[in-house]
Amino acid sequence: MRRMMIALALATASASAVMAAPAQTSATPKRAALAAAIAARHDTTVQDLRNWIALPTIAAMGMNVKEGPEYMRKLALDAGFQQAKIIESGGVPAVLATLDAGAPVTLGVYMMYDVKHYDPAEWQSPPLEGRLVERPGVGQVIVGRGAVNQKGPQTAFLAALQAFKATGRKLPVNLVLIAEGEEEIASTNLPNVVTNPEVAAALKRTVGVIGASALQNSQGTAGISLGAKGAVEFQLIVGGETSNRYPKSDVHSSVHARVESPAWRLVKALDTLVADDGHTPTIDGWFENVAPLTARQKEIVAEGLKGSSDAEAKAAVGVGRWINDEDLQTSSERLVSQPTVNIQGLVSGYMGPGGKTVLPSRAEAKLEFRLVPNMTRAEAEAKLKAHLAKRGFDDVKLVVSGGYGPNETDENAALVTAQRKTLDKAGIPYRLIVRNAGSWPGSVFTAAPISLPTGQFGLGRGNGAHAPNEWYLIKSADPKVAGIDEASLAWVDLLYEVAAAAKK
Amino acid sequence: MRRMMIALALATASASAVMAAPAQTSATPKRAALAAAIAARHDTTVQDLRNWIALPTIAAMGMNVKEGPEYMRKLALDAGFQQAKIIESGGVPAVLATLDAGAPVTLGVYMMYDVKHYDPAEWQSPPLEGRLVERPGVGQVIVGRGAVNQKGPQTAFLAALQAFKATGRKLPVNLVLIAEGEEEIASTNLPNVVTNPEVAAALKRTVGVIGASALQNSQGTAGISLGAKGAVEFQLIVGGETSNRYPKSDVHSSVHARVESPAWRLVKALDTLVADDGHTPTIDGWFENVAPLTARQKEIVAEGLKGSSDAEAKAAVGVGRWINDEDLQTSSERLVSQPTVNIQGLVSGYMGPGGKTVLPSRAEAKLEFRLVPNMTRAEAEAKLKAHLAKRGFDDVKLVVSGGYGPNETDENAALVTAQRKTLDKAGIPYRLIVRNAGSWPGSVFTAAPISLPTGQFGLGRGNGAHAPNEWYLIKSADPKVAGIDEASLAWVDLLYEVAAAAKK
């Protein structure tokens, strides 16, 4: 889920810089030895990734829901975690692993071991094979489900730990790893996992929780995200199943003269959710807890837009105008700050070419909220329910299929400082991102009772999350963009920078 | 198209009576000889029908659009029409045929030679074979596309003419036949046909225009329709194709924060078309020309409901309540009198199980008007356009895919009197139907400049119009229900009754 939002956030970025900076500027002692260990283990690391791709856990299908966490546990132990255990979640289990390096600082790491479903017929190579192919202008990539979302980037992280192990060195930080198997179904049970007493106690020792991603764009520019919107997916359903006012199956349309229409009822319910402008949410109390952007946040948006073209940004989305015909800065602020109610899909009655004289027996709208601080998922759900109830829409069924709230991390958090230093010292250009318009379940860490900084880190590239032919870069053709080994080395650097930043 | 509306109109009817009445009560001279001629030609008549079924004209697919009218022309000539010619319509051609019997009265006959499309995989026998099969409790039926809609009933009519020919007798009326090949695409060009000078002149000589149908229900009760609602099908479309405010293809849903949603825009446009009650049209001026039901029309509705059960009527549609929780009489009056705006279908974005985080690039509502006297199609279209324009919905594309206005015939018209007498004398129970809630293009005949009575006539049964395994009754197992030969004989009787009623 995360790849797309990162790509969106960076859609307007353009930059170029050298990837490898002089080693002496790094805080990492004996960096060359660690880099050599990473390089020496390259083939094994890639084989680890291929083995992981071959074992897809898909929560929605109940696929490998026992094998997946067990394999995750073994990966952690093999990478140097001294303890790794299965944590029951109420759904697909999570894994808690701890690595005690005797360090004063502890870093939390978030992983997902599940993947999105796939249709092999749509793939150019088998989605579970993890085939290595040359991608023109990009380099050698691995193709497979989960390659970039998130097994590839997570393997780069684990390979960094393997380098410490191979060189017999202690990590500069202790680690607490939380890995879930339900990210692709909106992390339904992750809140249960983080409030498990053992997990909560372990997390309490950390300076923050970071996830592994592949955050460089084709020019090599990385992003440092300071948060993400929350997302709640839900469906509104009206029909014979919700009230005996509506027919049980589609009937001839002439009957509408004396029989109520589920489709019209749905239109009437939907109409109350946004203003006549077609975008401003009108759910009662919707904006009550919405925090406006600070001056600094607007400044970060502006910095991120430097060198960007409004026309290119519009072309990337395929539109000629932003809402209210706003300029790029204003519309970018809106992108970051606006909590939305979106229609993902409308489904009712006859959907083929032309028309067909039926009165549909059922109408469904697939919707989704995007939430900003300080909204919560519970608040959004409760407000929607109250809003519909107040207007008498008892016959409109609400199904909330998943979601979580927004997350936000202070740009002065040690976790952020460490990312900046790592990138600065490596000479990697980057943009701060106020808030991803897309979403990831970081809110379970940033919200009470855990209340920690979060972030995403990782050099490298990939694409095709949730799509056929998903890929992750193994050996880069462009020195400005990291392959998997360089991504591992960046994790080594980051661990030292976290240790340094947290000590201050 | 017509079968379903008849079935609907009769859904609450129940009755039983003998089919064959004493011959001496009929106005038909030497009826026995004509009946014998019909019986003698039975196998040839059925083979005629099979040959016709084997030649499907499907306007929407451009199938047999030359062969269909040519075959229709030959059928007419073979049945005794002295002249039959192809009439260009602007689309699939029509056929005009005339039979001059030297009679003082001329009857118009409407036919359709086209059929709905079909998927052979869904059929138990090839849809073009016209296989004769036994249907338990019903009798021998012919199965094929067009069997009941309308080639079977029309063949029964033509077989009546063949009986006159075989017995060397003159018809009691002259005939003007108009046959179209676009009924299944809402008779798009029929208005052009009836205003063709030659056709209009021919129609002007008639006492009215009648179509051939199979109007008995399983108990043998027939219906005499005094009109039908009009129907206009249209689609409202919003998206990248209608405005550059909307994306050209589906994009990630987070983008909705700064990009307008076609789906919301469609909801907003739709919302203006009906009241918050979910059914009362609110298009500006919609009810301006709507004629309320007369006391006599309400009386006919009440007569038609005698012996009917509200619970059964609701069960037939699969609902527990009518609009406003009205009783059967009130809701039946509503069914007949209310001009509707119905949503046939909603199509936008992701339509599979659960959700998918997209902002759809397109949203479409498939709608349809049902019109009552004295509304017209042109009026309804113009009012919708003006309504949307007044509210600034310039980015909502309106596509009108077909339709026609309502039709109404006075119950004292000779055409109606003739039907009543024919059924009365044959001892067939029947119901008057104020107005079919469903539709047929009779309005092209009832509206100016033609301004004639219309109707539908025909004994017999069938089902499956527009569906797989469409059938029409050839030899009835129930004496109260007509097979094709009895249906032909009823046409003979009707022609004499038309001659008698029109002379008065």
Image (cartoon, coloured by chain):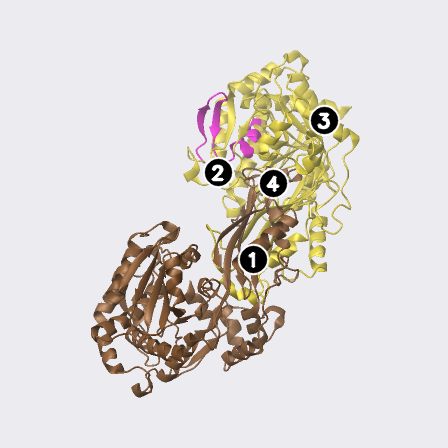
Chain colours: A yellow, B brown
Comparing marks 3 and 1, which lies closer to the viewer? Answer: 1
Residue A23 vertical placement versus B326 (above, below): above
- The residue carrying mark 1 is B379
Q: What amino acid is found at the position of numbered circle 4 in the picture?
A: Ser
Q: Assess whether mark 1 and mark 3 are in contact (beta carbons under 8 angstroms).
A: no
Q: Which quarter of the figure has residue B133?
A: bottom left
Q: Chain of mark 1?
A: B
Q: Is B108 inside the magenta-drawn segment?
A: no
Hey, which quadrant is residue B201 in on the image?
Answer: bottom left
Amino acid on which disc 3 is placed: Ala
A302 or A182: which is nearer to us? Answer: A302
The magenta-colored residue range is A128-156
Query: In which quadrant is the N terminus of chain B drawn?
Result: bottom left
Marks 3, 2: nearer the viewer: 3
Q: Which residue is mark 3?
A: A302
Q: Name the N-terminal-most of marks 1 and 4.
A: 4
What chain is tagged by disc 2?
A
Element type where label 4 sits in the image:
helix
C-alpha gap between disc 2 and disc 1: 64 Å
Answer with left or right where residue A323 lies relative to residue B117: right
Q: Is residue B245 visible?
A: yes
Same subunit: marks 1 and 4: yes
Instruction: Name the disc covering residue A55, or none.
Output: 2
Real-space Cα separation, disc 3 to disc 4, in angstroms: 23 Å
Quarter occupied by residue B132: bottom left
Q: Which residue is mark 4?
A: B253
